[in-house]
Image (tube, helix red, strand yellow):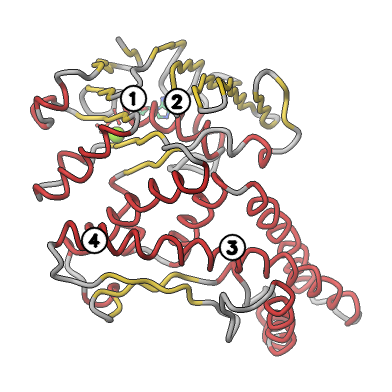
């Protein structure tokens, strides 16, 4: 699939801006702080419904303005899709083919992107939250049902936590009714995550082998706060196990005032040659792992939906000094629509820029 048109109104440092993209390689070139990442952020927003940089819509609206809109036209296997997102102080409105969507979860999934950004290193170096986000974004883009379960889970979790925090848990049965709902939604979330990682594993492993010339063995594993959950279990079995976990932790949860067990606390453990990467992997190895996970995503999306996502490369090519890493990323740009940001065209290979569409970005104006 590819994005053919992008229009921004009062998004970040843009006033009114419309561009037409090439279905192959697009390069956004400009000095620091001109709006290159902002443009990629807008594209990501159309796909994922979330910014990769902020959770607050207010940050996305041009200062002194009330509302921002992002419009895009996506050419996909089954025809064109018009996506529109209106951000305002009173909330969001999202449209697919001019039809307003009642929930954001209905908006997500019509357009797939894979974004490489300098922040990707956090996938390896950062806390569990970053890695959960990686899974959630990926599954959310390709599996509407996953988002549905996750949203229900998060809502129920917030209600349970509120009850725990209020301290007024005289009513045991009331809390138990939350436990039942939470464990059912949570079990769906966990099972889909386990399946996803199992599919991603061989691809990421192979990409890592390609980059490192087989010197290291990269693996990962979903580590749940709920003991003994696995792919060989049914949703009901996982839910049962989760219920048990909640019961075991009830005293603790009451003391802490929040829920200490469940997929919202789970993590992915990353290993190189069987050892935990967080404690020993070098900077270069960490970067290679992050890259392998992202490249594996492209393949995963292709398998899930039958077409390639759009590849967004924010400032990363200049960072890739390793020839193999560059080649791997560049070979992708032959298969998929690619949108690259850079401060200088010197950082890019001639081969890449010769047939690319070039955009200059300066002070929120793209030409
Ligand atoms: N809500 C907003 N309203 C107006 N301007 C904003 C808003 N949010 C960010 N900006 C401005 O956008 C600019 C940053 O844009 P962006 O992150 O896209 O830069 P960039 O071109 O990617 O730069 P770099 O090469 O350093 O990554 C900054 O000048 C910032 O002040
Ligand atoms: Mg930037």
Q: Are marks 3 and 1 in contact (CB under 8 Å)?
A: no
Secondary structure under badge 1?
loop
Q: Are marks 1 and 2 in contact (CB under 8 Å)?
A: yes
In the picture of the structure, the residue carrying the numbered disc 4 is: 208
Q: Position of residue 355 (x, y in %)?
A: 19, 18
Q: Position of residue 159 (x, y in %)?
A: 77, 63
Secondary structure under badge 4?
helix
The label nearer to you, 3 versus 1, is 3
Quadrant position of the C terminus in the picture: top left
Label of residue 12 in the image: 2
Q: Are marks 1 and 4 in contact (CB under 8 Å)?
A: no
In the picture of the structure, the residue carrying the numbered disc 3 is: 192
Name above or below for residue 210 compared with residue 231.
above
* Disc 2 C-beta below 8 A from ligand 1: yes
Residue 108 or 37: which is nearer the viewer? 108
* Disc 1 C-beta below 8 A from ligand 1: yes
In the picture of the structure, the residue carrying the numbered disc 1 is: 35
Judge the density around disc 4: few (<14), some (14-19), many (≥20) Cα neighbours within 10 Å.
many
Q: Earlier in the sequence, mark 1 or mark 4?
A: 1
Q: Earlier in the sequence, mark 1 or mark 2?
A: 2
Q: Earlier in the sequence, mark 3 or mark 4?
A: 3
């Amino acid at each position: 699939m590819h994005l053919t048109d992008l229009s921004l109104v009062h998004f970040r440092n843009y006033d009114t801006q419309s561009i037409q993209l090439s279905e192959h390689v697009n390069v956004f070139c400009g000095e620091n702080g001109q709006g290159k990442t902002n443009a990629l952020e807008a594209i990501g927003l159309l796909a994922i419904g979330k910014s990769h940089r902020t959770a607050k819509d207010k940050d996305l609206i041009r200062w002194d303005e009330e509302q921002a809109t992002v419009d895009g036209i996506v050419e996909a296997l089954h025809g064109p899709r018009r996506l529109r997102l209106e951000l305002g102080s009173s909330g969001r409105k999202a449209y697919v083919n001019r039809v307003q969507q009642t929930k954001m979860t209905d908006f997500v999934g019509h357009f797939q992107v894979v974004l490489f950004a300098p922040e990707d290193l956090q996938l390896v170096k950062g806390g569990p939250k970053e890695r959960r986000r990686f899974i959630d974004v990926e599954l959310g883009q390709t599996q509407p049902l996953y988002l549905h379960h996750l949203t229900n889970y998060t809502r129920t979790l917030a209600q349970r936590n509120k009850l725990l925090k209020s301290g007024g848990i005289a009513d045991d049965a009331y809390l138990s009714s939350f436990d039942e709902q939470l464990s059912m939604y949570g079990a769906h979330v966990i099972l889909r995550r386990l399946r996803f990682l199992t599919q991603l594993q061989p691809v990421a492993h192979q990409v890592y082998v390609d980059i490192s010339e087989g010197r290291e063995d990269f693996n990962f594993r979903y580590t749940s706060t709920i003991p003994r959950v696995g792919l060989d279990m049914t949703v009901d079995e996982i839910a049962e196990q989760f219920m048990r976990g909640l019961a075991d932790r009830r005293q603790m949860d009451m003391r802490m005032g929040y829920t200490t067990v469940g997929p919202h606390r789970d993590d992915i453990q990353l290993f190189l040659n069987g050892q935990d990467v967080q404690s020993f992997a070098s900077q270069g190895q960490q970067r290679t792992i992050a890259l392998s996970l992202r490249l594996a995503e492209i393949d995963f999306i292709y398998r899930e939906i039958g077409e390639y996502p759009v590849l967004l490369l924010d400032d990363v090519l200049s960072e890739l000094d390793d020839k193999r890493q560059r080649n791997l990323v560049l070979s992708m740009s032959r298969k998929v629509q690619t949108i690259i940001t850079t401060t200088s065209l010197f950082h890019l290979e001639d081969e890449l820029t010769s047939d690319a569409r070039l955009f200059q970005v300066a002070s929120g104006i793209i030409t």
